[in-house]
Every structure is written in structure tokens, then in C-alpha cells.
Amino acid sequence: MPREFFRNDRVAAQLRRLLAELVLDLRDANVGDVAVTDVEVSRDLSHAKVFVNVRDETQVKTSITALNKAAGHLRGRLSHAMRMRHVPALKFFHDDALERGSRIDELLAQLRQKQ
């Protein structure tokens, strides 16, 4: 019987939970108000893509840059919280799924009005 969960999925879920707390504790003003939405971990557990949603649209670039600069610090804090030999390297990306979803909703609403 195949395993239902792979190790990288379990590590990604734990990283998402811990990073959500750690990002809130960052004292960098450039980070702003961000929420960790998803984490994708490579199969060899050496790299992690962290997707964040930035509340203020005008501050997306500065927030992502500040998070990538703080990645080493966050990785160090994760190494104390997780029981792993090697914590994955972190790379932060903007998650624009909410914006794309709202845009699709707007387009569907326009189509309904035309009918």
C-alpha cells in the first residue's frame, strides 16, 4: 500500500506553520503585513519556496525583498524549532492567487450581466 503523505509534504506543512509565527515576530518595518499562504519543499529537502500574501499592494516588492534578506535569520530560528539535520534554504515569492481569483470573479460577473 503506497504512503499517503510524502516527507517533503509533511516538512512543508510544518514549515508553513512555523514561518507564519516567525514572520509575525520580525521587527523589520519593510516586511509589513504579510501572511504565509503556502510552502513547497524540493524532493531532497534542500530548498523551500515560501509563498506569502502581502496585504498592501504597494508594498509587495519591498516586503518580498525584506523577507529574502531575513531568510538566513528565519532559517536559523527554524533550525531550533524543527528536528531536522538540515533546514531547507528559504526563498520568498508573492502569492497572487487571491488577486487572480477576484479578477476571474469580476470577469464572470461581467459575462453574466451581458447575458
Image: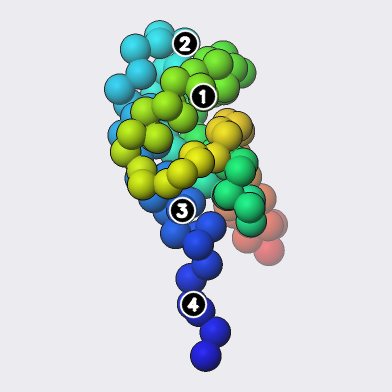
- Mark 2 neighbour density, 10 Å: few (under 14) some (14–19) many (20 or more): some
Depicted 38 relative to depicted 111: above or below? above
Look at discs 1 and 2 and give the one toward the viewer. Answer: 1
* Residue marked by disc 4: 4
Q: Which residue is mark 2?
A: 30
- Number of the front mark, 2 or 3: 3
Which residue was labeled with disc 3? 11
Element carrying mark 2: loop
Q: Nearer the viewer, residue 40 or 89?
A: 89
Of labels 3 and 4, earlier in sequence is 4
C-alpha separation, residue under disc 1 versus residue under disc 2:
14 Å
Distance Cα–Cα, label 2 vs label 4: 40 Å
Using residue 83 as the reference point, say whether residue 103 is left or right of it.
right
Q: Residues within 10 Å of mark 1 (few under 14, many from 20)?
A: some
First reached walking from the N terminus: tag 2 or tag 4: 4
* Residue 42 picture location, percent across and down: 63, 51
Badge 3 element: helix
Q: Secondary structure at mark 1?
A: helix
Q: Foreground residue, 81 or 55?
A: 81
Q: As displayed, is residue 23 above or below residue 61?
A: below
Tell me if residue 3 comes above or below residue 13 in the rendering: below
**Circle 1: residue type:** Ala
| Residue at 50 percent of width and 79 percent of height | 3
Q: What is the CA distance from the residue labelled 4 to the residue labelled 1?
A: 30 Å
Q: Disc 1 or 2, which lies upstream in sequence?
A: 2
Q: Residue at x 36, y 43 (%)?
A: 82
Q: Relative to residue 32, is residue 95 drawn left or right?
A: right
Q: What residue is disc 1 on?
A: 71
Q: Residue furthest bottom?
A: 1
Kind of residue at badge 4: Glu
Q: Residue at x 56, y 33 (%)?
A: 90
Mark toward the start of the polypeptide (2 vs 3):
3
